[in-house]
Amino acid sequence: MYLCKVHNKISHSGIVESVADGCVKVRILQASACGACKVAGHCHAAESKEKIVEVFCRDTAQYSTGQEVVVSTSGDVAARALLLGFGVPFLVLIVVLVLVLQVTGDEGLAALCALAALIPYYGVIYLMRERIRRQLTFYLE
């Protein structure tokens, strides 16, 4: 992964896994910050995971299974995804924790309520997944 400061773009190289009905599935290798280190193969701190990214495009005929491509998105899209996945749930957790703790004074109940408050949040995210998918777009270069 690399971030191009000039264009505010995040890109990953990957291999086309499948092509079907306006969707190209690309397998990318997501590496930790130390994954590119020369001794990463001998160190247990270096992590890397394979991810499948769905890229929706009109002209899928130009892509074939096994082809190397570059998947990219803007930094704004990445920031929005991080906010939805981590920022908002953290705020929900903290706000509910503090409110229930102030009202009841029971730390255990406050912790359980804070965790339970995440269930409706992720339920709404799940129900809105198609709308979110349209907003968080990837492109093939």
Image: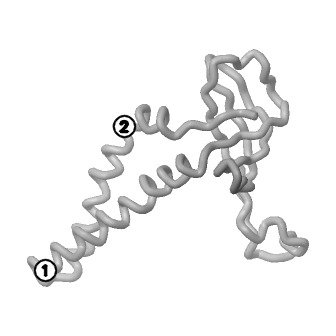
Q: For the residue carrying disc 1, how many other residues have a C-alpha within 10 Å: few (<14), some (14-19), or many (20+)? A: few
Label 2: which residue? 128
On screen, residue 24 versus residue 86, left or right, reads: right
Residue 83 placement: quadrant: bottom left
Give how far across and how far down residue 12 sits, in percent.
74, 47
- Note whether 129 is above or below 24 in the view shown: below
Per the model, the C-alpha gap separating discs 2 and 1 is: 32 Å
- Specify which label sits upstream in the sequence, 2 or 1: 1
Residue 36 placement: quadrant: bottom right
Give how far across and how far down residue 7 sits, in percent.
68, 48
Q: Residue at x 49, y 56 (%)?
A: 82
Give how far across and how far down residue 6 sits, in percent.
70, 52
SS category of the residue bearing label 2:
loop
Instruction: Using the image as rendered, state which of residue 41 and residue 33 is in the foreground.
Output: 33
Q: Residue at x 72, y 47 (%)?
A: 11
The tag on residue 102 is: 1
Q: Residue furthest front?
A: 6
What kind of residue is marked 2?
Met
The reply to whether discs 2 and 1 touch (Cβ–Cβ < 8 Å) is no
On screen, residue 134 versus residue 105, left or right, reads: right
Q: For the residue carrying disc 2, how many other residues have a C-alpha within 10 Å: few (<14), some (14-19), or many (20+)? A: few
Q: Residue at x 72, y 68 (%)?
A: 33
Q: Residue at x 16, y 82 (%)?
A: 106
SS category of the residue bearing label 1:
helix
Q: Residue furthest left?
A: 103
The tag on residue 25 is: none
What kind of residue is marked 1?
Gln
- Note whether 93 is above or below 122 in the view shown: below
